[in-house]
């Protein structure tokens, strides 16, 4: 039975936000209803215009000064809000979304503690998920690294990250990885060069072998794929605060049956 497409509203339309909007706009399981920006800084009135396509769901732009979030959600209702804006974006929509039971997915990379506390408070009334890096790959890397760290807690561990030349600070994702593995942030090895979107690597060194876990973002649309994964796995959740690890943990149950391919047969390399 096909599930009804989710109506999604989005905050933020920078480089990453635009890539995510492209994925949501083209995905059959979502209808991107609108995008909220700080200002209408271009002649384009909708995501469809930006992409140069015709659509019965053009996903118009709105600004935070145009109307308050309550009025926006009443006039243009959605099932979920995806936030790629900034640390203060939740102050605009958070209360209005929670009071209407609208799912909140925040992908802000470096929240101050007071914003995280606000998200936890909102999660008492609706489904809230926060991930500083919402790509499926980086979260798989993090979970696999934590498993290996628990198996061999005394091995040497180093964290590396690479980003575009103009990124000044150590990435929030690298800080999360280091923190989860018990590594001080000042030990993170950072490289800045060209237009690298994002590379994160964890090196485990122990006698006679090494293990390297590496993730590279080839295009920012990877964040959109992560949003689709989150939306799908949050559909039936009750109110509460979730992370990507919460959503991915069931897939780490290796004693369950192997998945079948589209023809109904086990994968060819299943053994």
Image (cartoon, grey):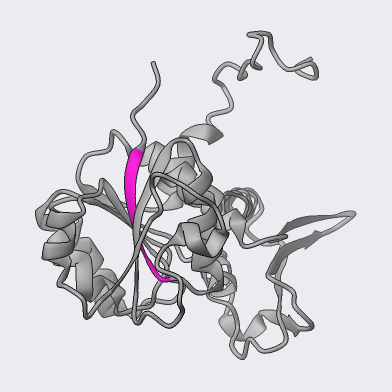
As drawn, 84 above or below 211: below
Residue 151, visible in the rendered structure: yes
Spot occupied by residue 52 in the image (x, y as percentages of width and height): 57, 58
Of residues 229 and 29, which is closer to you in this image?
A: 29
In the image, which residues are magenta? 6-12
As drawn, 134 above or below 246: below
Residue depicted at 75% across the width and 82% down the height: 191
Of residues 221 and 41, which is closer to you in this image?
A: 41
Query: Is residue 133 rendered to the left or right of residue 34?
Result: right
Query: Is residue 244 rendered to the left or right of residue 71?
Result: right
Residue depicted at 79% across the width and 15% down the height: 271
Spot occupied by residue 214 in the image (x, y as percentages of width and height): 74, 58
As drawn, 69 above or below 143: below
Is 8 part of what is drawn in magenta? yes
Query: Is residue 70 rendered to the left or right of residue 90?
Result: left
User: Where, by quadrant of the figure, is residue 96 drawn?
Assistant: bottom left
Spot occupied by residue 152 in the image (x, y as percentages of width and height): 66, 53
Query: Is residue 178 rendered to the left or right of residue 21?
Result: right
């Amino acid at each position: 039975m096909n599930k009804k497409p989710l109506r999604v509203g989005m905050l933020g339309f920078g480089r990453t936000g635009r890539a995510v909007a492209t994925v949501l706009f083209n995905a059959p399981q979502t209808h991107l209803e609108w995008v909220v920006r700080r200002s209408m800084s271009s002649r384009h009135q909708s995501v469809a215009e930006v992409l140069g396509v015709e659509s019965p769901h053009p996903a118009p732009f709105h600004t935070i000064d145009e109307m308050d979030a309550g009025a926006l959600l009443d006039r243009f209702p959605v099932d979920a809000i995806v936030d790629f804006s900034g640390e203060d974006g939740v102050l605009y929509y958070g209360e209005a979304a929670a009071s209407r039971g609208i799912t909140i997915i925040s992908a802000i990379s470096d929240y101050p503690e007071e914003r995280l506390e606000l998200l936890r408070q909102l999660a008492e009334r609706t489904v809230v998920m926060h991930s500083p890096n919402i790509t499926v790959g980086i979260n798989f890397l993090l979970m696999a690294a934590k498993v290996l760290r628990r198996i061999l807690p005394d091995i040497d561990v180093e964290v590396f990250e690479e980003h575009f030349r103009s990124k000044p600070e150590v990435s929030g994702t690298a800080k999360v990885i280091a923190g989860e593995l018990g590594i001080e942030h000042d030990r993170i090895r950072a490289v800045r060069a060209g237009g690298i979107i994002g590379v994160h690597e964890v090196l485990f060194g122990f006698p006679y072998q090494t293990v390297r876990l590496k993730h590279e973002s080839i295009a920012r649309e990877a964040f959109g794929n992560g949003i689709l994964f989150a939306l799908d796995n949050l559909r039936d959740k009750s109110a509460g605060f979730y992370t990507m690890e919460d959503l991915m943990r069931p897939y780490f149950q290796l004693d369950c049956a192997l998945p079948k391919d589209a023809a109904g047969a086990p994968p060819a390399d299943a053994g």
